[in-house]
Amino acid sequence: MTRVVLTALALLAVPLGQAQLRDAQPVYFWPMQHAFDQYLAEAVNGADALSVTVDPKRASSMMTERIDATFLAALEELFPEQKPAKDEDDKDVKSKESIEGRFQLARPKNRPQGRPQGTLFLVDVKTRRVIWSTYMGEVDPEPKALHKEAERVVEDITALMGPAT
């Protein structure tokens, strides 16, 4: 019974992932370690997998290897979130006196020592949601290895997207 439910959920998730990836275009590649963003852009363009932009303001999504305070600040600067106009008479406005107002904590600025490596994230710039990610493991910084890894990432993306319609 559990297998049937899991299989059904997996089959439903694939079309959702395909739609999200197709809607995530064009993609801007955030600068990455060892210039991996350049290898990815070349591989994606060569396979005609996704539409790529060199202007981050024109992007629908961004590929990055880190989701941290620096990335989020840049995302907010490039794509400020539209906040609804505050209505003075609105009774649902959360004040500092409400429970919700007192327990909203800022994201901590401290990070663990070291730099996480090997994970890529595709982030929707409007919703700030991660719509795709993959773990590559540690990648050899040699150009041939970076090129090969970029091609593998593109194969993963195109396999998930399925045939073009």
Image (spheres, rainbow, N blue to C red):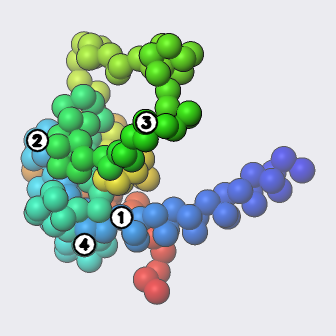
| Residue labelled with disc 2 | 34
On residue 24, which mark appears? 1
Amino acid beneath label 3? Glu
Q: Amino acid at mark 1?
A: Ala
Residue that numbered label 3 is attached to: 88
Element at badge 3?
A: loop
Residue on which the image places disc 4: 51
Mark 2 or mark 1: whose residue is earlier in sequence: 1
- Residue 39 lies, in percent from the top left, at 15, 57
Q: Secondary structure at mark 4?
A: loop
Q: Quadrant of residue 44?
A: bottom left
Above or below, 66 against 155 in this view is above
Which circle, 2 or 1, is nearer the viewer? 1
Front of the two marks 3 and 1: 3
Residue 55 or residue 63, whichever sits in front: 55
Residue located 56% across and 33% down the image: 91
The amino acid beneath tag 2 is His
